[in-house]
Amino acid sequence: MPPQRFALPSEVPGLAARRIAADILDGVLHKHRTLDDQLDGAAAHPGLKSLADRDRALMRRLVATILRRLGTLGHVLSRLLDRGIPTDAPRAQSALLIGAAQILWMDVPDHAAVDLSVRLVQSDRRAAKYAGLVNAVLRRCAREGEGLIEEVRSQTLDVPPWLLARWIAHYGESVAREIAEAISHEPSLDITVKSDAEQWASRLHGEMLPTGTVRTLLQGSVTILPGFAEGQWWVQDAAAALPARLFGDVAGKSILDLCAAPGGKTAQLAHAGARVTAVDRSPARMARLRENFARLSLQAEAVVADAVEWQGGDSGGFDGILLDAPCTSTGTIRRHPDVAWLRQEADIGALVALQKRLLQKAVALLRPGGTLVYCTCSLEEEEGEQAISALLASEAAMRRSPIEAGEVAGLAEILNPEGDLRTLPSHLRQPDPKLSGLDGFYVARLVKS
């Protein structure tokens, strides 16, 4: 009888993707590292290079699903564990979350979800003693999990309580719940095309939104999709594509894009014929902007500098300034679910102070008669409505230029009474939740007299 051969953990299909998912989850939940930092760039997880595209897509979807459903997962697992989730072995916690997420929300056979989570625990020295526990809990999850979800479906557990309380106070309970529901779904891929959006919607098996954005449910690496390598389009949420259009005709005008990277709005301005100066303090993000512009065959002056301290520009001022200010990013949780668990309410004060300094800088750099478009991808009123009210109260030369529905494809629901733009994740509803929604943005257009 030939000797029995046991497969090493690295040889088990799908295990590497789940091991990396566990590492990245640990990075978000325990080390406060963003998903972007762990997935791209110099600090990305080293194991990503050896993952096949299919496994990489599975890993991303797995991490995102867990972060979108973290509150509900916590409830389900707490009901299935007599003594709570083990705290002395992070890998055991990750294995339980990974297994339960696959069982409850992903198209993975229950037996495979259980088996791979058990193998994940067995491969970690500190967690190995919990293999039996993980096996038993996940088997119970397969039997009882759906019922446990029903118990709390109305409780909005997947938004941190402090954030939900703020949304209820600002938007009302009904809208706050609609936002929470919208961000629980995996979003579509939104694309800004250089021309002929209808043709690209057809080629990418998607649809053209009223605003001109192409929306598709295609998954996997965007770099292999038609038109990417040729520089015919770039990835950009439909709401993020609106601010740059509010300048009107920019052909030949000097436009300053402050806090520009990674450059989607910069690309819109350059493609429309503006002479764009893009300023951002992050060398890595500006390197990415330059790479994107090379692929897109677009031109802009790219400057690595702190926007508040930057002394460049024309002596007469810029014709237009786009300020996409750093913010809490709570409007992007549907695409960046880690934001919900990395941000704290205490972060808002420091960001508001920075936004105030950036707005003052933008006013100083704008020529008389010039247009300032201010935007944040935040749902918090301090970073939007209140920031602009404070600026208008302190800067006599600035006045609001209300945005009209015709400038945003007739979508009156995304305009507030003052004529500012306020998109919510629950806007642009479609029968398929995955084709619905927008990132949450606030945008105001001001003119210098």
Image: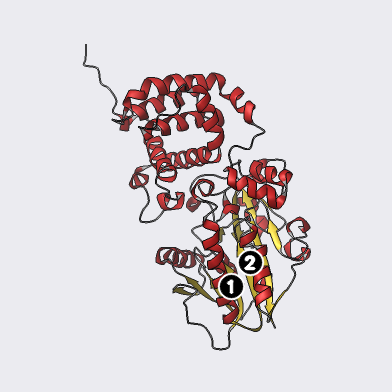
User: Where does the N terminus fall, quadrant-wise?
Assistant: top left
Q: Which residue position holds label 1?
A: 359
Q: Which residue is mark 2?
A: 387
Crowd class of label 2 (few under 14; some 14 to 19; many from 20; radius 10 Å):
some
Circle 1: residue type: Leu
49 lies left or right of 394:
left
Q: Nearer the viewer, residue 76 or 101?
A: 76
**Amino acid type, label 2:** Ala
The answer to whether 292 is drawn above or below residue 256 in the figure is above
CB contact under 8 Å: marks 2 and 1: yes
The residue sitting at 53% across, 24% down in the picture is 79
Compared to 56, does 5 lie above or below?
above
Residue at coordinates 57% horizontally, 49% vertically from top-left? 333
* The quarter of the displayed image where residue 25 is located: top left
Relative to the observer, which residue lies in front, 173 or 219?
173
Residue 249 in view, yes or no: no
